[in-house]
Image: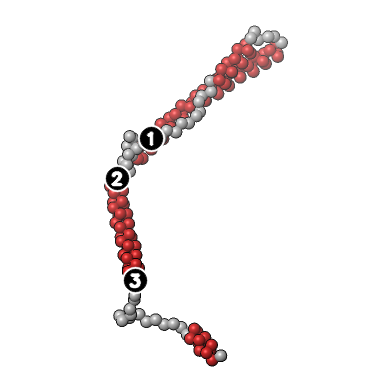
């Protein structure tokens, strides 16, 4: 029993290690090579990153934004034209429907036929329905070089 108490007493005492000039550290060759390789990798990555940052500072950002601006302007122009066509078609449809309502109201009031006028207006409405503007948006991929110029 006294043997167990001695071992237990040894485990409960704090382990103190003093590091001084006389402390010996033993490393095998693999560990030393690994430490050197990791350090060299970090130094290499640091200098590569610094070179990339310096190169990025020298590149003009205007070229890329100008290309983006031109593409956006082109898309906006197409969308405005499509919207204008749609508004014109809606205005024509509105005019035809107003005329139809007027003819129908006069037919009801007078009790007369409109001599094919309603058929003509219906044909015009069908033409407008078939003439709907194309609202499809086409996205075009443009290849650019590192400076943002079109290839």
> Which residue in the structure is indicated by mark 3?
28
Q: Secondary structure at mark 1?
A: loop
Most foreground residue, 99 or 120: 120
Give the distance between the C-alpha atoms of the residues marked 1 and 2, in whole angstroms: 20 Å
Nearer the camera: disc 3 or disc 2? 3
The quarter holding residue 17 reads: bottom left
* Disc 2: which residue: 59
On screen, residue 119 above or below 81:
above
Q: Nearer the viewer, residue 27 or 138?
A: 27
Asked whether the viewer can see residue 46, the reply is no
Q: Position of residue 131 (x, y in %)?
A: 53, 20
Left/right placement of residue 19 relative to residue 76 reads left
Above/below status of 135 relative to 55 = above
Quadrant containing the C terminus is top left
- Foreground disc of the pair 1, 2: 1
Contact between marks 1 and 2 (CB within 8 A): the answer is no
Label 3 vs 2, first from the N-terminus: 3
**Residue furthest top as drawn:** 115
Chain-order first, disc 3 or disc 1: 3
Front of the two marks 3 and 1: 3
Earlier in the chain: of badge 1 and badge 2, it is 2
Determine contact: label 3, label 1, CB under 8 Å. no
The x and y percentages for residue 22 are 31, 81
> Which dot marks residue 142?
1
User: Quick one: label 2, few (<14), some, or many (20+) residues within 10 Å?
Assistant: few
Circle 1 packing at 10 Å, graded few (<14), some (14-19), many (20+), is: few
The residue sitting at 36% across, 40% down in the picture is 65
């Amino acid at each position: 029993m006294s043997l167990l108490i001695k071992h237990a007493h040894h485990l409960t005492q704090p382990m103190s290690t003093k590091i001084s000039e006389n402390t010996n550290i033993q490393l095998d060759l693999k560990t030393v090579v690994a430490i050197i390789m990791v350090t060299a990798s970090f130094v290499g990555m640091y200098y590569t990153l610094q070179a990339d940052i310096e190169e990025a500072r020298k590149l003009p950002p205007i070229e890329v934004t100008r290309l983006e601006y031109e593409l956006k302007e082109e898309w906006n122009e197409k969308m405005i034209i499509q919207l204008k066509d749609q508004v014109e078609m809606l205005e024509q449809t509105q005019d035809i429907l107003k005329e139809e309502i007027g003819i129908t109201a006069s037919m009801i009031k007078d009790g007369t036929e409109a001599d094919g006028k309603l058929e003509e207006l219906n044909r015009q409405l069908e033409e407008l329905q078939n003439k709907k503007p194309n609202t499809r948006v086409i996205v075009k991929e443009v290849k650019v070089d590192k400076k943002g110029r079109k290839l």
